[in-house]
Image (tube, rainbow, N blue to C red):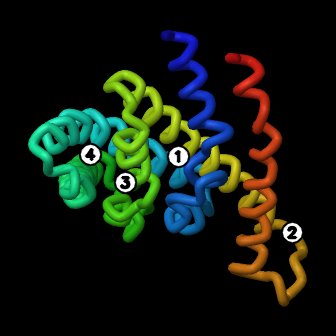
């Protein structure tokens, strides 16, 4: 069972990366990845919300399914995520003001971050047990962190590069994001071979 959880974790981080392979959570990926410290701060907040959302939604999903109310799944999950994001926002505003100010508008956007909703929905859809769901969520969060930090490094390098005028701004950012995304395709068979 431990081997399965390790495989699930690394698959979520590398081959099933929510940002670079599934293209979920692109808004904060592009918006908050200009500096490494804000990218790490946002990623830690997303990891916290993903893990807590999974811990809360897993039993709620089991309850909804047992009562024949599985069609309410998405609404309930969004409400849970919104409440958790409010909790994170209150804690950051009170104890880590610099990070709260640097994240700005992107912090409330965790509520609508497709990666957070996607991980809890995919855990429910795949029928993962509680521990497997938590491992998958932590792996997805770690993958989000990895993608954010790598892309923040790439964007930091681009600031000091001579970019043609036609590519400056959003075009070069999207080109760089696609190249970073392609780099994760190299992990395609590694996780399956190591843990097979």
Front: mark 4 or 3: 3
Q: Residue at x 73, y 59 (%)?
A: 156
Q: Is residue 10 left or right of residue 138?
A: right
Q: Residue at x 66, y 38 (%)?
A: 14
Mark 4 against mark 1, which lies toward the viewer?
1
Query: Is residue 169 visible from the viewing direction of this image?
Result: yes
The quarter of the picture where residue 53 lies is top left
Q: Earlier in the sequence, mark 4 or mark 2?
A: 4
Task: Tell me where residue 149 appears, x and y as whole percent.
Answer: 63, 47
Looking at marks 3 and 2 on the same chain, the residue that comes earlier in the sequence is marked by 3
- In space, the residues marked 4 and 2 are separated at their CA atoms by 36 Å
Q: Which residue is mark 3?
A: 117
Mark 2 element type: loop
- Picture coordinates of residue 138 (x, y %)? 45, 33
Quarter in which the C terminus is drawn: top right
Q: CA distance from mark 1 to mark 2?
A: 23 Å
**Furthest residue to the left?**
67
Q: Is residue 171 above or below residue 25?
A: below
Q: Earlier in the sequence, mark 1 or mark 3?
A: 1
Judging by the rendered image, the residue that carries numbered circle 4 is 95
Cα gap from disc 1 to disc 3, whole angstroms: 20 Å
> Which class describes the residues within 10 Å of circle 2: few (<14), some (14-19), or many (20+)?
few
- Rendered image: mark on residue 161: 2
Residue 68 vs residue 185, the one in the foreground: 68
Mark 1 or 2, nearer chain start: 1
Question: Which residue is tagged 1?
Answer: 40
Q: Is residue 6 above or below residue 17?
A: above
């Amino acid at each position: 069972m431990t081997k399965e959880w390790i495989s699930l974790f690394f698959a979520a981080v590398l081959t099933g990366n929510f940002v670079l392979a599934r293209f979920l959570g692109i808004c904060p990926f592009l918006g908050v990845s200009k500096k490494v410290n804000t990218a790490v701060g946002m990623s830690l907040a997303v990891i916290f919300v993903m893990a807590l959302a999974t811990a809360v939604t897993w039993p709620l999903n089991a309850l909804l399914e047992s009562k024949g109310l599985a069609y309410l799944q998405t609404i309930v999950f969004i409400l849970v995520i919104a409440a958790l994001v409010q909790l994170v926002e209150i804690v950051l505003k009170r104890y880590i003001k610099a990070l709260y100010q640097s994240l700005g508008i992107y912090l409330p956007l965790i509520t609508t971050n497709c990666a957070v909703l996607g991980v809890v929905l995919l855990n429910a859809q795949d029928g993962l047990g509680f521990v497997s769901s938590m491992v998958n969520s932590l792996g997805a969060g770690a993958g989000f962190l990895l993608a954010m930090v790598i892309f923040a490094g790439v964007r930091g390098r681009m600031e000091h590069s001579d970019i043609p005028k036609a590519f400056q701004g959003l075009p070069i950012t999207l080109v760089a994001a696609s190249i970073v995304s392609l780099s994760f395709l190299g992990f395609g068979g590694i996780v399956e071979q190591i843990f097979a």
